[in-house]
Image (cartoon, grey):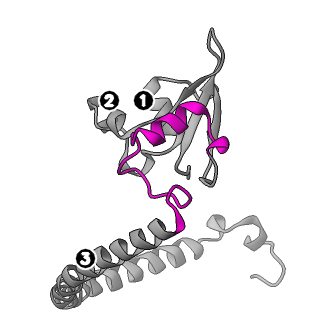
Amino acid sequence: MCEFVSWIETPGKRGPVILFLSAEALATPKGLEIAPDDRLGHGAIRQYYGLAQDEGTNHECVDFSSPSNFPAEIVRALKRGEFRGLGTPKGLLSAATWAEYQQIRQTALAEYEQTRQPAYAEYERVRQPALAEYQQACQPAYAEYQRADRNAFWDLWAVPANRSPAWGKKAKGIT
């Protein structure tokens, strides 16, 4: 799985070209065609820009402690906010601001849990009886399947010509 931030470097007439996906690019019709679970990866970049698998060099970096870890194009995009909504990398905020962000994050998570927990409890309340009904309905059919499966196997085995050569008519100890 590719990490935020990923980019592909391709050769260009005036030097390397850095290709990456911004939030704006992902909001375009072409960007919306990319599978949600691959929106930050090299496959998404290749799909968006129409690159072949062997075209360009994949890069990614998760160390946001210094802008020198990234190409200038990525640094500019970060500073302009072009990655808004795509990640929350540690290292971009000061320590005090990171602590403030963590508080905001915890508050939002607590609000989410207040909604999720009763919804999940309701789901479980409905799921348990539905699962029991499903199992009750399927159990006789599964038992019949197992009986038919095992009988078919042993009926075939009963014919010596059907046996593996190691277990054929001339196998040691078999009459």
Query: Earlier along the polypeptide chain: callout 1 or callout 3?
Result: 1
User: Residue at 78% of width from left, 70% of height from top?
Assistant: 166
User: Residue at 46% of width from left, 36% of height from top?
Assistant: 77
Q: 1 above or below 118?
A: above
Q: In the rendering, at what x and y percent does residue 41 appear?
A: 51, 44
Residue that label 2 marks: 30
Tell me the kind of residue under disc 2: Lys
Crowding at mark 1 (Cα within 10 Å: few <14, some 14-19, many 20+): many
Q: 39 above or below 116?
A: above
Gap in angstroms between the C-alphas marked 2 and 1? 7 Å
The residue closer to the viewer here, 20 or 53, is: 20
The residue closer to the viewer here, 124 or 14, is: 14
Gap in angstroms between the C-alphas marked 3 and 2? 31 Å
Tell me the kind of residue under disc 3: Tyr
Crowding at mark 3 (Cα within 10 Å: few <14, some 14-19, many 20+): few
Numbered tag placed on residue 62 in the rendering:
none
Residue that label 1 marks: 48
